[in-house]
């Protein structure tokens, strides 16, 4: 039985690859809907980009919803310096013609969890957690019905990528992250510690291009564009392909390993706002609220990703 998921996202080239991977894996995953949030670029672009990706995959029937256009408390911080002004720079794709759903993304999340059987819905969060936190605040009773939240965000050993202390998704909306991390819902976290181990090296990008399809070409062009910023910053041989780790975990959990630990969010200090304080060494007796992933078999990850994308 495929797992029913909602993808909450701020596309973003890496978000786009994650969405395509989900579409390419119907045995394991049934995507009930895609909810866009402001993050890498403003909401007007993330909701448009989500539909561009759906149309690229031939999924015009997919329900795409626009969600929150700014964080709960903080002023929106975006990342055009990484993703380009459209958020999907690297290849020019046609504007979407498929409809954006009328309802707000938060209402879709709340109603889906209310209507579906308890323990059957997985929330896959690839951007700032504003939509999820707003849904949990709007309808606290849905938290107990969530099967699992799998999110890309935070860091411990890798520390920060948008500030010296914080990873972008958590930094943009730390108050929302605090609500999600304290919600009590089963939580699996893909931090920079693991995403920095799946770098878009040249052979891996060429393997995508060699798929020989429009999708393979788009993914190669996106990663070519998206990686230049991180390669310059880290001097690495590729960029971390962050968000597909969330979807890959649903398909091949054995590729990943981590620890069940306490993770709390800094919301008070301007200097360390959005830091995920992860008790990796079990120093405190704070509640273990998250499976914090620290390692991945990166060759297996890319073999699986490339093989799946070749199916589309
Ligand atoms: O820090 C990486 C995260 O921020 C990824 O989800 C990327 O898409 C951006 O949203
Ligand atoms: Ca993202």
Image: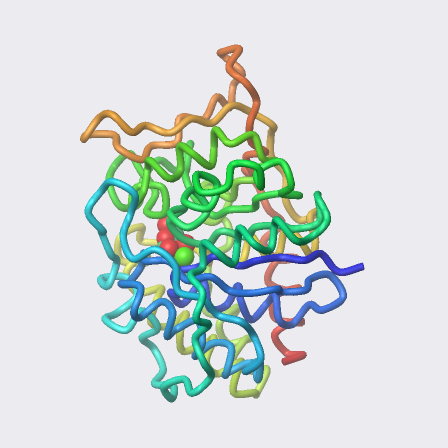
- Compared to residue 235, the image places residue 20 above or below, namely below
- Which quadrant would the N terminus be assigned to in this image? bottom right
Considering depth in this image, is 285 or 238 the residue closer to the camera? Answer: 285
Q: Residue at x 70, y 43 (%)?
A: 119
Q: Is residue 41 left or right of residue 250?
A: left
Q: Nearer the viewer, residue 76 or 16?
A: 76
Q: Is residue 224 above or below residue 60?
A: above
Across and down, in percent, residue 36 comes to 41, 62
For the residue pair 189 and 67, the one nearer the viewer reads as: 67
Residue 96 is situated, as x and y percent measured from the top left of the image, at 41, 84
Residue at 57% across, 37% down: 141
In which quadrant will I find the C terminus?
Answer: bottom right
**Viewer can see residue 237:** no
The tally of labels here is: 0
Q: How is the image coloured?
A: rainbow
Residue 81 locus on image (x, y percent): 22, 62
* x and y percentages locating residue 143 in the rendered image: 57, 38
Q: Which quadrant holds residue 212? A: bottom right
Residue in the image at 53% along x and 80% along y? 216
| Residue 37 visible in the shown view | yes
Q: Indicate the quadrant where residue 46 lies.
A: bottom left
Q: Ligand 1 is in which quadrant of the figure?
A: bottom left
| Residue farthest right in this picture | 1
Q: Is residue 131 left or right of residue 147?
A: left
Horizontal side of 75 relative to 18 (left or right) equals: left
Q: Nearer the viewer, residue 256 or 92?
A: 92
Relative height, residue 12 to residue 90 (above, below): above
Q: Residue at x 71, y 44 (%)?
A: 118
């Amino acid at each position: 039985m495929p797992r029913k998921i909602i993808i909450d996202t701020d596309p973003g080239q890496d978000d786009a690859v994650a969405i395509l991977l989900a579409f390419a894996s119907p045995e394991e995953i049934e995507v009930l809907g895609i909810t866009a949030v402001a993050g890498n670029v403003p909401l007007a672009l993330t909701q448009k980009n989500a539909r561009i990706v759906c149309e690229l995959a031939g999924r015009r029937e997919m329900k795409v919803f626009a969600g929150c256009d700014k964080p709960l408390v903080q002023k929106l911080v975006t990342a055009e310096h990484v993703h380009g002004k459209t958020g999907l720079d690297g290849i020019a794709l046609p504007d979407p013609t498929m409809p954006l759903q009328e309802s707000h993304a938060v209402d879709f999340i709340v109603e889906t969890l209310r209507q579906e059987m308890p323990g059957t819905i997985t929330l896959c969060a690839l951007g700032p957690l504003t939509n999820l936190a707003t849904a949990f605040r709007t309808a606290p009773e849905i938290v107990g019905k969530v099967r699992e939240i799998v999110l890309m965000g935070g860091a411990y050993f890798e520390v920060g990528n948008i500030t010296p202390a914080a990873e972008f998704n958590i930094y943009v909306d730390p108050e929302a992250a605090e609500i999600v991390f304290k919600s009590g819902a089963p939580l699996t976290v893909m931090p920079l510690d693991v995403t920095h181990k799946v770098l878009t090296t040249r052979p891996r990008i060429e393997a995508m291009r060699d798929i020989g399809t429009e999708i393979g070409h788009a993914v190669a062009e996106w990663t070519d564009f998206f990686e230049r910023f991180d390669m310059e910053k880290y001097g690495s041989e590729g960029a971390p392909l962050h968000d597909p780790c969330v979807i890959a975990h649903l398909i091949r959990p054995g590729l990943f390993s981590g620890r069940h630990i306490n993770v709390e969010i800094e919301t008070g200090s301007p200097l360390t706002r959005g830091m995920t304080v992860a008790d990796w060494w079990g120093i405190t007796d704070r509640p273990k609220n998250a499976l914090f992933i620290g390692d991945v078999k990166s060759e297996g990850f890319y073999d699986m990703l490339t093989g799946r994308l070749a199916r589309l």
